[in-house]
Image (spheres, rainbow, N blue to C red):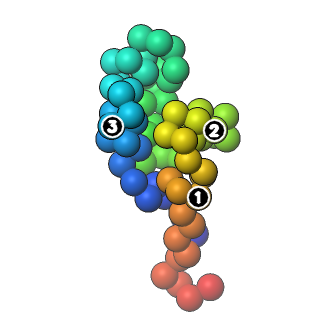
Amino acid sequence: MAIRYKTDILAALKEKGYSTYKLRKEKIFGESTIQKIRSGEILIAGQLSQICKLLDCQPGDIIEYVPDDEGN
């Protein structure tokens, strides 16, 4: 079982005017959070909430559940 991003979060934020520089400068996200997004790690609820606020979307719009290939 895995949860993954459906979209490139940083690209979507950039389209809304939030470059990684701006995210750090305005203290929206720290460097470690930005690196987690880059590496595909799913963030904690508060950080996902902030992304949804910035992108004006729901969590299901940016993350999805992908079942294992084991047939469970």
Q: CA distance from mark 2 to mark 3?
A: 18 Å
- Image coords of residue 71 (percent x, y): 56, 88
| Among numbered discs 3 and 1, the one appearing first in the sequence | 3
Residue 49's label in the rendered image is 2
Q: From what the image shows, is residue 39 above or below residue 16?
A: below
For the residue labelled by badge 3, is the local secondary structure a helix, a strand or a loop? helix
Residue 15's label in the rendered image is 3
Q: Nearer the viewer, residue 62 or 30?
A: 62
| Among numbered discs 2 and 3, the one appearing first in the sequence | 3
Identify the residue shown where x is 51% and y is 14%.
Answer: 27
Is the C-beta separation of discs 3 and 1 under 8 Å?
no
Examine the rendering and report whether any part of residue 4 can be seen. Answer: yes
Q: Quadrant of the N terminus?
A: bottom right
Question: Which residue was labeled with disc 1?
Answer: 60
Q: CA distance from mark 1 to mark 2?
A: 11 Å
Is the C-beta separation of discs 1 and 2 under 8 Å?
no
For the residue labelled by badge 1, is the local secondary structure a helix, a strand or a loop? helix
Q: Nearer the viewer, mark 3 or mark 1?
A: 3
Q: Residues within 10 Å of mark 3 (few under 14, many from 20)?
A: few
For the residue labelled by badge 2, is the local secondary structure a helix, a strand or a loop? helix
Q: Quadrant of residue 65?
A: bottom right
Residue at the right extreme of this rendering:
45
Q: Nearer the viewer, mark 2 or mark 3?
A: 3
In the image: residue 23, left or right of residue 44: left
Q: Amino acid at mark 3?
A: Glu
Q: From what the image shows, is residue 43 above or below residue 62?
A: above
Q: Amino acid at mark 1?
A: Gly
